Each structure stands twice: as C-alpha cells, then as structure tokens.
Image: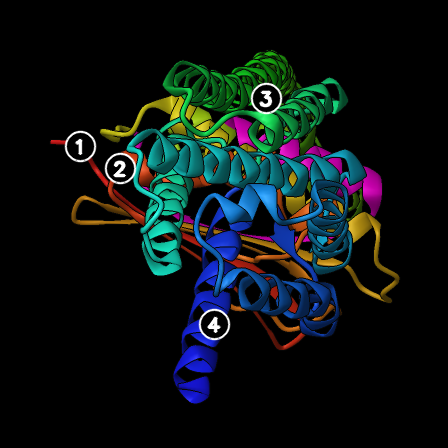
Amino acid sequence: MLENTITKVVFLTVYNVIMINVYMDSFLIYHSKKRMILGWMPFVIWEFIRITSIWHMYPEGILTRQNPGINLFVNILVMVIAGLFAYQGEIWKRLLFPIMYVALLMVVEAAVVFGLNYLENSDFPIAFYLFLSNSMMSMLVFGIRNYVKVKEIRQGYVKDGKSLLILPLIGINLYYVLYKTALLMKTESKEITKGLIMSAILLLIILLYGYCIYGRMAKEFQILENNRFYINQLDLYKNYFHMKEEAEQEILRIKHDLKQSFLLIEHMLIQHQYEEAQNMIISMRGNVCSPLGLRNHTGNLALDAQICQMLETAEQKGIRVNINTDIQNILNIADEDLSVILGNAIDNAFEALTEIVAQEKQLWLDVRYVKGIVFIQVKNTYFGEQLTGIPKSNKTKKYHGIGLASIERMVKKYQGRMKIKTEDNCFSLEVVLYENE
C-alpha cells in the first residue's frame, strides 16, 4: 500500500514538473543545465511533500485543512526560485510567469473543490480531485502555449511588462479570501458554494486575460521593431541608389577622361615618345578601379542593396568580406521578405564581430539559386560555445531575439528551413527558401 502511494505521488510530481516546464518554455529561455537543476530542485521537493500531505484528505480538506499562508508562500517561493535560477532574461518575466502559474493553480484547485462540494457529495476520493485539477491545468497550459504559438510571441518580446505583476498578485489575494470563505461557510448552503464557484471562474478569466494583454503588448512591440527595420531598409535603398548614381557618374567621367588620354597617348606614339606613353598607361591603370556601388551587382534589388550596405559597413569596421552570389534578378520571393532575412542575418553577424577580439574578423555571404530554391548562408568569425540548431539561450543578444524570430517567420512563409551551427571558429546561419508558384 505504501509503495503504491509513493509511486502515485512520484508520478504526479513528475507530471506536474513536465507541465510547468511546458508552460514556462512558452515564455522563458532555459539557462545552463546546472542552474536548471538547482532552480527546479526546491520545487520538486515541495511538490512531493505537498502531494503526499493531501493524499489522504477529501477534496474539501485541501482548502479547509491546509494553512493557506504557508501553502501560498511556499508555492510562490519555489516557483520564483525556479524562474530566477533555471531561466534567463528580464527579471520581471522570471517573476511574472511563475507567479501567474501559482495563481492559476490555486484558482483551479478552488474551482474544483467548490464544484465537488456543490454536488453535495463528500465521498470523492482525492485521486478524483487530483485528476480533475490536473486535467484542467493541462488544458490551460496547452491552451496558453497554443495561443502563444498562434500569436507568434514565444519567449515574448515585451519591452516592459512589470505592471502585469498586479494581476497574479490580485489573484493570489482573492484566492486567500476564497479560502477563508470556504473555511467559514456552511457546507449545506448551496448559494454560498455557487457564489464561490462563480468567483473562482471570474478570477480565472481575469488571470487568463493577463495573457491576452501580454500578447497584445508583444505584438505592439513587434510592430514597432518591424517599423524600425523597414525604415532602416528604406534608408538602405536610398543609400544604394545614391551610390549607384555616383558610380554611374564616375564611369562617365572615366570614359570622358579615357578619350582624352587616348588622344594624348596616340600623339606620344606618333612622336616616338614611347617611354612617356608607357608611364601614362601605367598611371591610368592605377587610377581606374571598380566603384563600390557596382561591385557584386546581381540585378536583384534587395540583394544588391544589402551587399552595398554590407561592403560599406565592413570597410568602416575593418572586417574582411567574402561574397559569393549566383542568383537570377527576378525571384518569386518578395524583396521585403528577402531584405528581412538578409538584413537581420548580416546585422547579427556585424554585431557579433564587433564584440569579439580576433586578429582577423571575417564575414561570408553566400546566396545561390537552383531550380526554384534559394540558398542563403551568412557566416562570421566566432569563438564562443558550440551551437547546433536554433539556439535556446540568449546570453548575448546577437544570436537571439527579434532578428532571428523575424528570419524564422519568413522561412515559415516560404515553407523553408533554417539552421544554425558553429564549426571551425565560425558561426553560420543557413536558410533555404522555396519560391512561391
């Protein structure tokens, strides 16, 4: 009997840890494995103790035979420890979502207990209560996760959401009021129980609305970031056309000067001034070079604009650039979408290169087109930890955040693939896009 009980308690503890991980992973990013273990250890221990302590109670005893102050305090404490130690990012996020989860859990527990009590049957086993409450929490967790996925706000990009902490704190205080009411109410009063059920449901709606507010804030922040990016793209295009115009003017000047120089060389040859003519040809060869605006001209506006800006920035920062392009000038990929991918990838690479100390900083851009498929690779010198796949960590902002999320969104739009890897002291972002038919 004891072994059976322990097995059930362990199963429920592991199940709850998995559910909370699914929930937290929707908003926060894991830290190192060591910190993850340290962060979750208090929660696992407390969860085991909590489930063991209520295993032999009837459902209503969960509210009326536990100390609400201690229960709430320890629940919040262990969840906050998990948020602060096991995850990374802004502190307010690591406080908000653990506390929100505790508030949801408390309200669901209250709703289930009041609901069972309303049925005027106190013979429900604790296993039935745990099944109902865990089922409700599972539906809420996966519902919230799906909402985050649909709204494309995973790991949320909200600049400042400290005010959202008010909602779970209100919820927790109201839960305490519900507890005191449950403790003092007469069990035969169905009207009071019905009122408590409605209060728990209303409180649950208020808490869930907090996620909607967070989603709206994330969207607004994303729109602001996208607007900033598109304004930068407009400036980039203006700069590209300006440089192209200057390059064309330079070519006209060179053609005009060459015409005059050839006349002079012709006259020197007629006068048998061979040495002077040779020196003049050598001088002309040294003065004629490829203008910056016309280098790596592919015919694709988005790609040419990015390359132009890339060369100019690299020249200013003293970064060696290697460019390889084999692409047709007309693609069934919108210029703005291609700009989002190239612009963010190149910006991330430059940002990474400015933060490392290396004798030679290099940046590679490879763009190829083969039978309706566009291959893009942006690679830069890198001396950090080895990475494969989409990084789960954002210890430094250069490999995570709005930039990668925007690229990933464009990749999904074209049913493509995105891969990140590090090898041979290089960080590489590879993107494969399929043309729209």
Q: Give the Cα distance between marks 1 and 3.
A: 38 Å
x and y percent of residue 437 in the render? 11, 31
* Image position of 221 with respect to 422: above or below: above
Q: Are marks 2 and 4 in contact (CB under 8 Å)?
A: no
Q: Nearer the viewer, mark 1 or mark 4?
A: 4
Q: Earlier in the sequence, mark 2 or mark 4?
A: 4
Residue lying at 70% horizontally and 56% vertically, measured from the top left: 82
Secondary structure under tag 3 reads helix
Between discs 1 and 3, the one toward the N terminus? 3
Q: Amino acid at mark 1?
A: Asn
418 displayed left or right of 343: left
Q: Is residue 161 above or below residue 81?
A: above
Question: Is mark 3 in CB contact (under 8 Å) with mark 2?
Answer: no
Q: Which circle's residue, 3 or 2, is located before the other in the chain?
A: 3
Q: Camera-side residue: 15 or 228?
A: 15
Task: State the separation of the CA atoms marked 2 and 4.
Answer: 47 Å
The alpha-carbon separation of the residues under discs 1 and 4 comes to 53 Å
Task: Determine which residue is flagged by label 2.
Answer: 414
**Residue sitting at 71 percent across and 46 percent down?**
67
Location of mark 3 (residue): 251
Residues under numbered marks 1 and 2 in contact, where contact means CB atoms less than 8 Å apart: yes
Magenta residues span 305-329
Identify the residue at horizontal 76%, vertical 48% (top origin).
Answer: 70
**Relative depth, front residue between 139 and 331:** 139
* Picture coordinates of residue 268, whole percent (x, y): 71, 34
Residue depicted at 36% across the width and 45% down the height: 122
Tell me the residue that label 1 is attached to: 436
- Indicate the secondary structure of the residue bearing disc 4: helix
Q: According to the image, label 4 marks what residue?
A: 9
